[in-house]
Image (cartoon, rainbow, N blue to C red):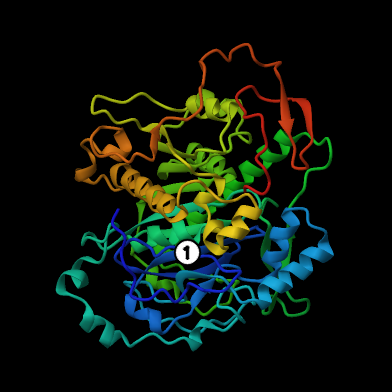
Amino acid sequence: MAQAAPDDEGWKHGGWLRGQGIPAPSGPHAVGCVDVMHLFEGETLGLLARLFYPTDRDSAARYPYADFCPDMMYYKGYFGFKKIYRPVSTVLGRLFSSLGQFKTPALYGAPFIDGLRPRPSQLPASNASGTGDGIPLSEFKPRGEEEEEEDKSEEERENGVAAGGSSGPESHPVVVFSHGLGAMRTTYSAICSDLASHGYVVASVEHRDHSACVSLRRVPVLGTHGQQYEDAWLEYYHLSPGENEFPVRHRQVLQRSRDVRKALDLLALLNEGTEFQNLMGNGFDFSQFKGKLCLEKAALMGHSFGGATTIMGMTEDLRFKCGIALDCWMLPIHRDLYDRGVSQPLLFINSYEFQWEENVRSMMKLTKPPDENGHSTCQILTIRGTNHYNQTDIPFLFPTFVLSLLKMQSEINQTAAHYLNQELCSLFLRRYLLRDPDMQGSVPNLDGCAPGHSISLIFGTNLHIGSVANDDNDDDVSNNVEHEDGTSSSMQMPPTAASVDPDPSQA
């Protein structure tokens, strides 16, 4: 995947507590984003997601780069997830906020590339909207429709923009993204922005199952009859000492599966042009997406716990045509799923340092041998020299000495790891979601054919794994489980569940 040199990298910051910044998206389009919260009928928590989408590069001068951390509560949530004493986490949160926000390469509230002028919302803006200080988006004015239309070529006006940056049908494929344990909707802004720069519309979900570091709610102010809302927060759930982990995580992954399916339902509402109340109150005109989304080309992605969510969501909703599980944590998945299998194409992209035998054995129960074309519709790839953080934004936000102190520094260059990860995602989506004819032959970095594949890739796993077929008599196997507090105990687990909880700092 060629790296596109951005016109402006204003989202990057210097300073002793600043890293190199999130890499520039590699696609031809600039990236916009906006937060959306919607209550479906009968719900109290609602769906919260950040939408990433392609926008015009000229929007960079008129819209703010989105904050990585939309509210100080998320800093407190991150530190609380690490079990830092609450008063200390509050002080650290204020310190990081006072040093200035980390920014992402997505322009908050910029118009959709095929869209219209935003209009003011009836709701007051949430202070956690991500513009930095709750400024209504109506104050950020795009250029006029006439000027925008003049800049379009005749082909663009007729056909719109297809994923991959080429002209095609006037619709955009969609991706739903699920975060890992202790993360939130912006933790993967590098991945989501990169996908959007190639024409995808990405809904990055913030889960409501108490697995996010914290999660924002908007609740009606008493006495206003639903006309005014204020912010409230769902906190991360820490396991109690000795608590059986699998039932907790399995309940959570079932809730997460419902969340990602609701995200796809929301994208369907946007495509239909159905009016709805966005509780974030940010003045964005979602009618810009009407008729512009290709729901027949929907993929599901996630990291760590989000990888398990990807597998569960795909089995429960066949609208997802394929899935990508990044450094997947398999513990939350019940053995019944392995009996059913996954019918859609699925790609595991693992880091070199995070995985362990039981976890990979669980993945291998879902993999499939290559077909007559040499393509495997469910396979494992491993990137050498990487750790669990390389598929998040964390390595880009802090300088090397901080990453080293926190034991987050990877052997491979973090930017190179990011672009290789994104190339693998792009190739897989082009083959199985977009059905790109150029991807139907042998592709070195997907199929392992030489010459041409990256020397940083392992086709399979770096671990030595025995047979995965003989699990029929394992129902009474007692597995050693590492808990969030670092202690371990023996407990009954479904035989196909992975037996180690990931380090909570490696969400």
Question: Is 260 in front, or is 4?
Answer: 4
- Residue at image position (65%, 57%) is 42
Q: Note whether 438 is above or below 63 in the view shown.
A: above
Q: Could you say where residue 222 lies in the image, as x and y percent from the top left?
A: 78, 76
Quarter-of-image position of residue 454: top left
Q: Could you say where residue 292 lies in the image, as x and y percent from the top left?
A: 33, 64
Q: Residues within 10 Å of mark 1 (few under 14, many from 20)?
A: many
Quarter-of-image position of residue 452: top left
**Residue 184 in sight from this viewpoint:** no
Left of 428 or right of it: where is 233? right
- Residue at image position (60%, 24%) is 496
**Residue 371 in sight from this viewpoint:** yes
What residue would you read off at disc 1? 22
Q: Could you say where residue 319 lies in the image, as x and y percent from the top left?
A: 42, 45
Left of 381 or right of it: where is 431? left
- Residue at image position (32%, 62%) is 27
As drawn, which residue projects farthest toward the front? 401
Amino acid type at image mark 1: Ile
Q: Could you say where residue 66 lies in the image, as x and y percent from the top left?
A: 51, 73
Element carrying mark 1: loop
Quarter-of-image position of residue 474: top right
Q: Note whether 230 is above or below 214 in the view shown.
A: below
Question: Is 290 in front, or is 201?
Answer: 201
